[in-house]
Image (cartoon, rainbow, N blue to C red):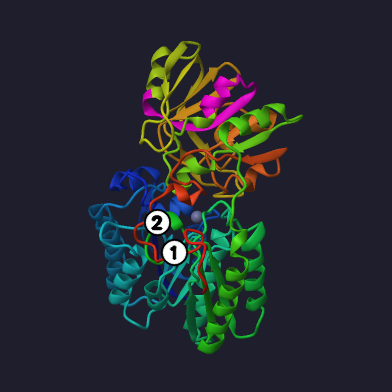
């Protein structure tokens, strides 16, 4: 059997509290590929697009690549940027239809928490436009991030949605294979899928909602039990992304069965009930910056990872937060690496004085007022780099990345990696690419909420989550929510459901 599949995707996790509007250039510089370039960039990678490509190869199917665009999480996406990308995807599908006459399916890599000016449910809008184009009979399946805010439109407009089962996200490739096999079974007329979604009134912060621990771990194992039942095709647990602040943000449970809507409803309801029972476990256990630094300095052995969870660019924070760095300098901490602080001016100043030159400038705290004030750093430029590296995983294994021009500045016992682009430094290769081995440092500061755990848990002696300021803070009382439905836990505590 040989089929013709269109593949593509647009991916963004939108933090509506961020003042950094997301423009087309943010997609173009982080991850943008068109047509055959998509195949060159993703073939052999453990990503959703890499999974779609392998699925098509294994089934001897023709692949028609459209576009793939992904930007570092940030504020609301500008309409112009969104329509340019969406039209690129739709034009690709139209091209495929005119080339082949007809297509057998559409496989998309989406996120699920993208918010566009005037369009709170961007993925629902994308799926609606794709559906209008291909009609009701061509299967459309998509992978979604674990942090998708699942809406009724998304569920209605796609034949199947395959959310990551992991946070840190290490199964994008596997979910893409699953989406491909699902479409193949529809084409072979083996299944007639029906789906049902329930969103309990719970919208946790991302930090306590990781899959290897606590309440989500419990919900995931229940979902896997349901998946063992005959006739059950897929059961997904979504953590949601509360910082999108849309009506439907938060936890969701999606069950897809072979034609049995009643069973799908029961399964989604079973998971929602369980989540409600254990909702009080969705809390983060954090230390304030000064205490966290003191604790790490006194620890008998390193590396102690200080996770600056609130300044996670992966959650839409600026990444240039300074409160942990300020404490490290104030307490004269030794044998430390800070990964990373995006600050173009600091990189330029480091390049100007050159390797070995004296650096004396303000670092960080420049994108907005939510992540601490700039901090004065006096030190020496140790290294300058183009900032390119290859992910060794387990996340994004094989993907080439660039953090933009990069410098290492040594200030007392603290090595600070400053770079040009906001990105989440989840892979130890970031530090290795500038000659620093995180295993050999006493203290490692990371701007990441959870993703760093996939590669740092095996090498860290201890991990401390820091309660600093920032737009990805697990402390939801720091934010003024406008659009999310109320009441919703934990923003509201005293209500029944
Ligand atoms: Zn995510």
Q: Quote the CA–CA distance across marks 1 and 2.
A: 8 Å
Q: Is disc 1 placed on a helix, strand or loop? A: loop
Over which residues does the magenta segment extend?
325-345
Q: Is residue 294 left or right of residue 416?
A: right
For residue 353, above or below residue 464: above
Instruction: Provide residue 333's location: percent of width, then percent of height.
Output: 62, 22
- What residue lies at 42% left-to-right and 33% top-to-bottom? 404
Instruction: Provide residue 36's location: percent of width, then percent of height.
Output: 38, 55
Q: Are marks 1 and 2 in contact (CB under 8 Å)?
A: yes
Pick whichever, 14 or 477, lies toward us: 477
For residue 492, above or below residue 315: below
Q: Is residue 339 visible?
A: yes
Q: Which residue is mark 1?
A: 149
Q: Is disc 2 placed on a helix, strand or loop? A: helix
Q: Which residue is mark 2?
A: 244
In reply to whether residue 29 is colored magenta, the answer given is no
Instruction: Provide residue 354's location: percent of width, then percent of height.
Output: 44, 14
Pick whichever, 317 or 433, lies toward us: 317
- What residue lies at 68% left-to-right and 44% top-to-bottom? 457
Labels 1 and 2: the sequence-earlier one:
1
For ligand 1, tell me if the residue under mark 1 lies within 8 Å: no
Residue 88 marker: none
Instruction: Provide residue 176's location: percent of width, then percent of height.
Output: 52, 65
Q: Residue furthest right?
A: 300
Q: Is residue 432 left or right of residue 240?
A: right
User: How dense is the environment of label 2, judged by Cα within 10 Å: few (below 14), some, or many (20 and up)?
Assistant: many
Quarter of the figure with residue 445: top right
- What residue lies at 48% left-to-right and 84% top-to-bottom? 194
């Amino acid at each position: 059997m040989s089929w013709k599949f269109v593949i593509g995707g647009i991916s963004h996790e939108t933090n509506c509290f961020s003042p950094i509007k997301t423009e087309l250039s943010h997609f173009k510089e982080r991850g943008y590929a068109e047509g055959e370039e998509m195949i060159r960039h993703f073939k052999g990678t453990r990503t959703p697009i890499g999974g779609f490509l392998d699925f098509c190869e294994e089934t001897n199917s023709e692949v028609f690549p459209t576009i793939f665009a992904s930007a570092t999480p940030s504020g609301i996406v500008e309409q112009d940027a969104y329509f340019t990308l969406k039209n690129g995807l739709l034009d690709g599908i139209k091209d495929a239809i005119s080339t082949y006459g007809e297509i057998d399916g559409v496989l998309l890599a989406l996120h699920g928490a993208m918010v566009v000016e005037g369009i709170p449910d961007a993925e629902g809008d994308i799926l609606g436009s794709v559906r209008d184009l291909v009609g009701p009979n061509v299967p459309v399946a998509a992978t979604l991030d674990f942090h998708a805010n699942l809406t009724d439109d998304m569920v209605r407009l796609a034949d199947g949605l395959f959310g990551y089962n992991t946070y840190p996200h290490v199964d994008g490739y596997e979910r893409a294979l699953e989406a491909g096999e699902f479409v193949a079974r529809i084409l072979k007329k083996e299944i007639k899928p029906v789906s049902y979604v329930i969103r309990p009134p719970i919208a946790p912060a991302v930090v306590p909602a990781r899959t290897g621990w606590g309440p989500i771990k419990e919900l995931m194992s229940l979902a896997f039990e349901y998946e063992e039942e005959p006739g059950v095709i897929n059961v997904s647990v979504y953590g949601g992304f509360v910082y999108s602040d849309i009506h439907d943000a938060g936890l969701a449970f999606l069950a897809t069965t072979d034609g049995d809507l009643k069973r799908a409803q029961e399964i989604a309801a079973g998971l929602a009930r369980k989540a409600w029972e254990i909702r009080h476990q969705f809390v983060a256990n954090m230390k304030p910056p000064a205490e966290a630094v003191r604790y790490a300095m006194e620890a008998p052995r390193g590396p102690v990872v200080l996770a600056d969870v609130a300044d996670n660019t992966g959650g839409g924070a600026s990444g240039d937060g300074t409160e942990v760095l300020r404490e490290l300098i104030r307490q004269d901490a030794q044998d430390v690496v800070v990964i990373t602080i995006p600050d173009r001016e600091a990189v330029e100043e480091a390049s100007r004085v050159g390797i070995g030159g004296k650096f004396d400038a303000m670092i960080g705290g420049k994108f907005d007022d939510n992540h601490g004030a700039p901090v004065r750093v006096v030190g020496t430029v140790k290294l300058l780099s183009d900032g390119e590296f290859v992910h060794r995983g387990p996340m994004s294994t094989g993907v080439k990345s660039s953090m933009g021009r990069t410098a290492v500045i040594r200030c007392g016992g603290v090595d600070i990696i400053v770079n040009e682009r906001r990105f989440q430094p989840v892979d130890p290769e970031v530090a290795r690419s500038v000659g620093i081995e995180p295993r050999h440092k006493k203290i490692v500061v990371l701007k990441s909420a959870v993703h760093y755990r996939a590669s740092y848990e095996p090498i860290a002696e201890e991990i401390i989550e820091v309660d600093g300021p920032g737009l990805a803070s697990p402390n939801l009382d720091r934010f003024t929510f406008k659009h999310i439905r109320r009441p919703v836990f934990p923003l509201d505590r005293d209500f029944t459901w």
